[in-house]
Amino acid sequence: MRAGGLRRLPPAGESLARLTLGRTTRRPDAASTLSRALARRLGAERVDLLASGREALRVVLRHLAARSGRAEAVVPAYTCFSVPSAVVAAGLRVRLVDVTPEGWIDPDALAALPLERAAAVVVCNLFGVPEPIKRVRDLARAAGAAVIDDAAQALGARGPEGPAGGRGDAGILSFGRGKPLAALGGGALGWAKAPADLPPPAPPQPQRLAAALRALAHDAALSPWVFRWVAVLPGLHVGESRFEPEFPHGPIPGAALALATAAEEHLDEAISRRAERAAELARLAHRAGFTPLLAGPGAQVSPARLGLRAPSAVARENAVRALRVSGGSPMYGRSLDVLEPLARHRAGEGACPGAREFAARLLTLPTNEALGPELHLRVFHALERASDA
């Protein structure tokens, strides 16, 4: 398809209505079906279905803080603003750790932190790439801190150390818009060892009619003719990551439960298709002078969008301007060490130069079903021009 004019592709997201309206939404045991399926994927002892990924992170951090008596959580200095939001909501202070050029936690920077004050270290697995976790896990556990393997963007990804979301003491999933398992809300918390003193929340009944209506509205908004206007409507905050420590608590909503149960059965197929599109875009981006942010050999990615590192900040800005109508996005735009609302909740005040550089050079591209050969070519030429400018 051709992107341009009055059309604009969303940066992530695929059709949900065909799943919701199919036979898979009629399960009477949706909550237990979904929990068991996710537990198998993560290798978790128990999976709790919660209101969002933020809520899942808040719940596990509160539990870990109460158990350890520690008042901090370590968070990569470049990640979704929802992560520090959950830390603050849990009553902890945010300790930032710098990141590598790939956007992963820098183990040397982590080793320099006072980890004996941390209840947990959060590994974020951005762009569906399973972040190497062994050294981070060794450093954290040597200091008595737990490791939270956040797979909000990486459900279905797998590295040599296991599945993203299943390599720590707990794993976080999000079912929000544009996530690998998208249900327009909801999330999950996977426990490597389930705490006996923290029972799972009672799940609601799946709300299938509400799920169908939400899915139809979502699919309509994905149309490039419609998304062009949805993206600029005030109050919707489409594509924004916001620092908001106030958010709903409790179990997964019934509509999200219906959508997530339906989508999980088709997840492997969807991941495979997105990975193929990401690989083709990565090949073209590399030819144009951009560095694809993908996993190493033998790893499986789950890319709801493809991350690229531009050769310079200027090239990134040129590429974002040229590719916005084709779904190009700067992602979060800035590192957490310059996020003013977070400053008073931080433990430590140091700058994170790696995260600032990463934020200045990051570009993401969609991997959804709207992509085709013509759009691939358009992306390649735009990246090539941006790199040469």
Image (cartoon, rainbow, N blue to C red):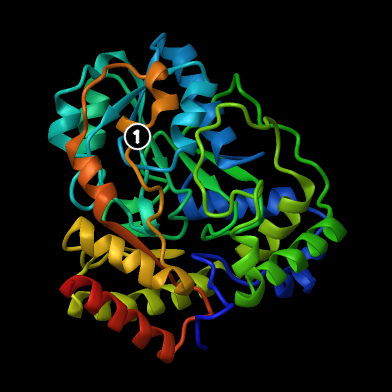
Residue 320, quarter of picture: bottom left
Does dot 1 land on a helix, a strand or a loop? Answer: helix
Left or right: residue 325 versus residue 360 is right
Given residues 186 and 188, the one toward you in this image is: 186
- Observer-nearest residue: 59 or 340? 340
Residue at 64% across, 65% down = 229
Q: Quadrant of residue 216?
A: bottom right
**Can you identify the residue that label 1 sits on?**
336
Q: Amino acid at mark 1?
A: Leu
In the image: residue 161, left or right of residue 29: left
- Location of residue 6 with respect to 155 vertically, above or below: below
Frontmost residue, 5 versus 13: 5
Q: Position of residue 321 (x, y in %)?
A: 37, 66
Residue 226 in sight: yes
* Residue 308 seen by the camera: no
Left or right: 31 with respect to 131? right
Q: Nearer the viewer, residue 118 or 298?
A: 118
Q: Is residue 2 above or below residue 232?
A: below
The structure residue drawn at horizontal position 49% and vertical position 37%, both measured from the top left corner, is 82
Tell me the quadrant of the picture where the C terminus can be found.
bottom left
